[in-house]
Amino acid sequence: MTVERAAFERIRRLVHSQAGIVVDDGKEYLVEARLSALPQEFGLKRIEDVAERINTEPALATRVVEAMTTNETSFFRDHRPFEILRTDILPELLRRRAPRNTLEIWCAACASGQEPYSIAMLLREQFPELANWTIRILATDISHAILERAKAANFSQLEVNRGLSAAQLLKHFDRAGLHWVLKQDLKASVTFAHLNLIGQWPIMPRFDIVFIRNVLIYFDMDTKRLVLNRVGGQLSADGYVFLGGGETLIDTDSPFERMNFERASCYRLVSGKQRANLSAAPGRE
Amino acid sequence: MDLEALIAQAYNLDPLPVSAARLAGLVADPDSNLASITEVINLDPSLTGRVLRAANSARSAARSSITTVSDAVIRLGRGTILSIVVGSAARKHLQCSVPAYGLSENALWKHSVAAAITAEVMGPIGRVSVPPEAFTAALLHDLGKLVLGRFLDAHTLALLEAAQSQGLNSLEAEREILQVNHAELGGLIAQKWGLPDSIVQGISYHHRPEESGLKICDIVCVANDIAVITGLADIPTPVVAEDHTAVYRRLELTEDSKSRIVDAVKNRFIQMMERFAK
């Protein structure tokens, strides 16, 4: 069953160099599972044939990288970040942004779109006073294929079961056969774009809120540092960053400090002076 | 894994009788009354016979004999009534062998009944407030294995095994390799059967109850755990054990109450198997 060692090495080098994703030893089975459909798609016989061509066929290499990215997501994933967004972060930001009535939000690895659409639903349900604001939700991902799915906003029953209540489903979605399609106005409230976190970033606004959850776990420490510092440079001075529940900033020398709320946390930028003091303290997160 | 085909297969499983789904809705509704529950059962002659037989079964027969459905509901309790009705309908599915999960004929059924009994005895022994529909959720918690098992060929099983050899538990391995797990697939079937949302949630999150936050998910999680501990069903030991210490803590179940629950489940198992068989 196992993918030959040389092929495994080629594939994991490619995935690391192009996406920053680390494929650990012992993960041959994952390469096998994720790439099993590719040989046939490209008229080849085996994954080893795919591995041999990835350095000379860019389209194939792109498909390999996309297939190796993990797209696990769900609506209102982990609940609590959305709860503190509702109870603490948004009310505070809205007060501060009231003069210009604009809010910029970025979901930095959006997969099939459940996260940005959850934020859009939360804003619509809980903050009706924002109707005349300019709210921009940018959702990016490295995979073109998954972005197409996200834009379509067409979800299976299994996908909507992950995190949505029956009331939310009926309120924000239309039934289409066995699937559920997000209503057009919410769909239109999210802009999707391709972005490789370790590649060149396009010109983007300063964001008030950045969701970059369950992405860093796939990176090595150098890549984490790089990405976090770039995210810091993209964040408003008083903006907030949300990471995945199991992710920490230990040893990343990032420009963020942790803010603890009841049963959840997020991060904000520390000032240059504070940063100099804090970085002297060992084990800072 | 062809998720569309998987969902279609889940939807093709024989549905529950309409009366069973209606009864489930009433049992899960704290505002429903005895009269409405009785009415649903009375309208279905086979259901009526089943409920009366259960109420007059060995354990209950020491007392005066039961001749009306309303007396049967009072004697057995609405949660037990529902588990009997749903269990009788789901039994033919759950008795099947599921080779992909190492389950021979009847093994899944025995495990499911042991889980249902656990949910039932957890209340009085562990002083846990158990919603009546939890027995049914526990009984159906592994429904998804029936469908997912049909999609697991030798190659996929080898991938799942390799994932577990790298330290993932079975549920994590399913999610990583298949993008779906048997628990949420079971929830999907229960949803298709028209069972109330609390039962759907109890099934969907029985391995990761903290993701739902509903108490019924904690209860079904522990019911599954204790059903395994009883050893009443011949089911494979997980390669990587899940740690549910926090779930026991949330339900305030001590080691002592846990071992008393295990004993109670073993004591009641034969009688409960007979109850469902009638």
Image (cartoon, rainbow, N blue to C red):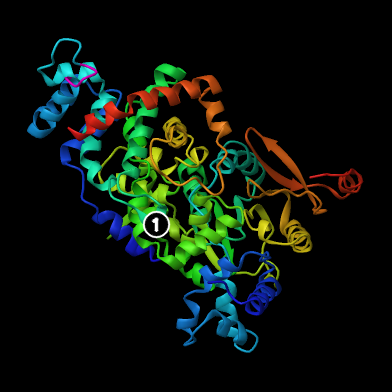
Over which residues does the magenta segment extend?
B56-60
In the displayed structure, A37 sits above or below B46; it is below
Disc 1 is attached to a residue of which chain?
B
Res B51 visible: yes
In the displayed structure image, the side of residue B23 where residue B198 appears, left or right: right
Q: Main secondary structure of the magenta part?
A: loop
State yes or no: residue B211 in magenta: no
Res A176 visible: no
Q: Residue at x 66, y 50 (%)?
A: A243
Q: Residue at x 18, y 21 (%)?
A: B55
Q: State the image coordinates of residue B135 (x, y, percent, origin top left).
A: 33, 30
In the displayed structure image, the side of residue B68 where residue B242 appears, left or right: right
Q: State the image coordinates of residue B37 (x, y, percent, origin top left).
A: 18, 25
Please state which of residues A184 and A10 is positioned toward the viewer in this rendering. Answer: A10
In the displayed structure image, the side of residue B154 where residue B159 appears, left or right: right
Q: Secondary structure at mark 1?
A: helix
In the displayed structure image, the side of residue B82 where residue B155 appears, left or right: right
Instruction: Tell me the residue that label 1 is attached to.
Output: B100
Please state which of residues A212 and A6 is positioned toward the viewer in this rendering. Answer: A6
Please state which of residues B159 and A149 is positioned toward the viewer in this rendering. Answer: B159
Q: Residue at x 72, y 55 (%)?
A: A235
Q: State the image coordinates of residue B168 (x, y, percent, origin top left).
A: 58, 52
State yes or no: residue B58 in magenta: yes
Res B117 quadrant in image:
top left
Badge 1 amino acid? Ala
Identify the image quadrant of the N terminus of chain B.
bottom left
